[in-house]
Image (cartoon, grey):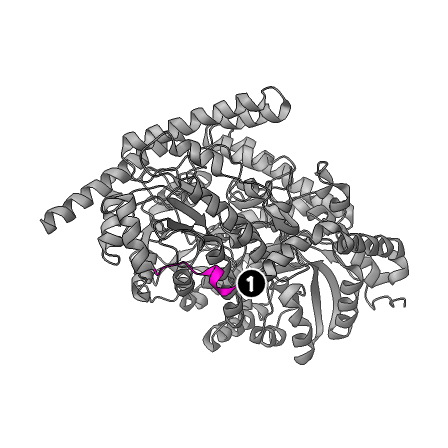
Amino acid sequence: MTAKPAAAAARATVYGYPRQGQNRELKKAIEGYWKGRVTADALRTTAADLRRSNWQQLADTGIHEVPTGDFSYYDHVLDTSVMVGAVPSRHRAAVDTDALDGYFAMARGTQDVAPLEMTKWFDTNYHYLVPELGPDTSFTADSTKQVAELKEALALGLTARPVLVGPVTYLLLAKPAPGVADDFEPLTLLDRLLPVYAEVLADLRAAGAEWVQLDEPALVQDRTPAELNAVTRAYRDLGALADRPKLLVASYFDRLGDALQVLAAAPVDGLALDFTGSAAANLDDLAAVGGLPGKRLVAGVVNGRNIWINDYQKSLATLATLLGLADRVDVAASCSLLHVPLDASAEGDIDPEVRRWLAFARQKTTEVVTLAKGLANGTDAISAELTANRADLASRADSALTRDPAVRARTAAITDADGRRSQPYAERTAAQRAHLGLPLLPTTTIGSFPQTDELRVARADLRAGRIDTAGYEERIKDEIREVLSFQEKTGVDVLVHGEPERNDMVQYFAEQLTGYVATQHGWVQSYGTRYVRPPVLAGDISRPEPMTVRWTTYAQAQTSKPVKGMLTGPVTMLAWSFVRDDQPLGDTARQVALALRDEVNDLEAAGTSVIQVDEPALRETLPLRSADHADYLAWATESFRLSTSGVRPDTQIHTHMCYAEFGDIVQAIDDLDADVISLEAARSHMQVAGELAEHGYPREAGPGVWDIHSPRVPSTEEAAALLRKGLEAIPAERLWVNPDCGLKTRGWTETRASLENLVSAAREVRAGLTADNG
């Protein structure tokens, strides 16, 4: 059946685009600036060139309305803090002296000043800088960046729509500033913030903006009546402005729920909604509130977070239904394309049969344009695209890669006993302490050590054939010996081998498991200049052979101290991959868990007494709606226990988590039944230690005392102070001393100094405890 053309020609748009460039030009320019090799003017030129290239690519593809303001040197929430003048007092002097250096000081800190706290952007692996606000915060408008980027796009002859973080989401993402009472609610500052947004909107209108998009993704979470009332007030006031651009309020990542009726009734000109995954419920909810008569609807029907091709027929059916619910319907991706790589066509090493199933940012813009054309002109106008799309979808559904009968049979045979240790923690811990003989407040690191230029060159030389495998492995052995020697001289109690052979904590394992596909150019921003290449989880998972045993065993043979085996847990293997969408996540997690269980058991059999299975994504992947939490946490914690429960009682199982709101999942952390957990705590001032204590967490924990995402070196006194704060919540016999996270991104100079200070702090506090007990 041929779809009828839309009453008003549908337009194609997106909310944001990858920032880094085809070859990560932005990363290289920023890091060059930090090192003094790139001038500020050269950095700004690189950024302007990338913005222009992005907009031109979007326009050439057929995007009718390009986004501006989404480009960032580090983080769009930090950009918003600058826009509204919410600069912490400790950074004010740096910002006033040099705006660019002050901006990076807020993001990364300096040796003398701590950075802003960093945490995950909703349930993605993108990290944002948390605004710090208090009752004395005063806001001032600075629309310089937003206006300049709009003018750049308009000068190219493009239709452009500035994109801003909305005022309610901005305040809901904020935390009380240091020294402010924990019960302070940043949302109480709304009436103080709205005039600043009004001023920015007026500036953008004066610069030529017809529409401005205000992103409110916080509204897809559970919100109280008071918070929904704040939304009503915010958009009543902004909608009533006399001289303003048209307002498009956008929300994404899940269904809006009660907030949809509030926004539908608000005096704004349009809504942008997600209609993918669980957010597909927005369709029925929108019909239930009577649609959006007289307003524009931007329909996010192309998944902006995953990399599978769109089902055109399904999306067109959704769009056809939406036509009767709004004055006009335009087509978009479900969220910013920041969360996907740039271009699937660059992946020449991927099997062409698999590559046809993939859509990165450039392919997704084509999908958006195709759907808008079909909606505007009828399906006959895109008949060739529909035929090709059906063939690509069928290719994936029928592929042998997606189903392995042996894997599915093993997964089906899992029993409850497979996910339980043979003895309870109270009995295990006695056996572990006797076996390991560790001191009070044992010290360790999270796993990785600096990835030096020499290591990167060695990997490049191996790929290029300039050295053979034997030569490369000798280089790895040299690095392992150096890392172990440094730790032993420093006095670390439980060592790591430093992971010099690993490119990434997920990709390294994905490349050795069946069912995964690795990319060569699929870079996605995690934070700042940190980019990762999430592998593609395309089929059933199994482990053909041991993945880490060889190097862990080699490291253990070099020292009498325990060396941790290091693995990435099943939830994180899913969360930091582009996961398959053709079966329940829990089923995929169990497949990965069984593969990891084989590895854990082989490590133990090879003599490894401490094994760490990292799950930093456990909180990140928590559904945004509380009604969905229980089902997720059930399979997530089960998959971790399935990975780790096959070992002896005297084998100590560790896990690690970082940069998330752990207080929301303390019970789940308990349910993992790990013997030791290490957690990020330095930037959040040991907040998690109190949350563990309040819960009554019974196991051992290492809240971090060194913020590794900042280049500053914490002093012995600073680390000792954090450690003593941790002792206020966690008994000394259950407290470990460690950094917040792995050291891969740090340099050796700061790593040596910081780790020496960390060990000195542990010794100092340990000596005080011994003296007190003596």
Residue at the spot 74% in from the left edge and 60% down from the top edge: 331
Residue at the spot 52% in from the left edge and 71% down from the top edge: 231
Q: Which image quarter is the N terminus in? A: bottom right
Residue at the spot 82% in from the left edge and 63% down from the top edge: 375
Q: Is residue 130 left or right of residue 531?
A: left
**Relative vertical location of residue 566 with respect to residue 66 in this rendering, above or below:** above
Residue carrying label 1:
217
Does residue 422 belong to the magenta stretch?
A: yes
Image quadrant where residue 459 sits: top right
Q: Which residues are magenta?
A: 415-424
Image quadrant where residue 544 sits: top right
- Does residue 161 appear anywhere in the picture? no
Q: Position of residue 563 (x, y in %)?
A: 37, 38
Question: In this orientation, which residue lies closer to the viewer: 183 or 310?
Answer: 310
Image quadrant where residue 266 sits: bottom right
Secondary structure beneath label 1 = helix
**Relative vertical location of residue 239 with respect to residue 549 in this rendering, above or below:** below
Q: Residue furthest top?
A: 466
User: Could you tell me the amino acid type at mark 1?
Assistant: Pro
Does residue 293 belong to the magenta stretch?
A: no
Question: In this orientation, which residue lies closer to the viewer: 285 or 269?
Answer: 285
Q: Position of residue 371 (x, y in %)?
A: 79, 58
Q: Position of residue 53 (x, y in %)?
A: 68, 40
Q: Position of residue 639 (x, y in %)?
A: 51, 58
Majority secondary structure of the magenta segment?
loop
- Does residue 203 appear anywhere in the picture? yes
Q: Is residue 415 left or right of residue 742?
A: right
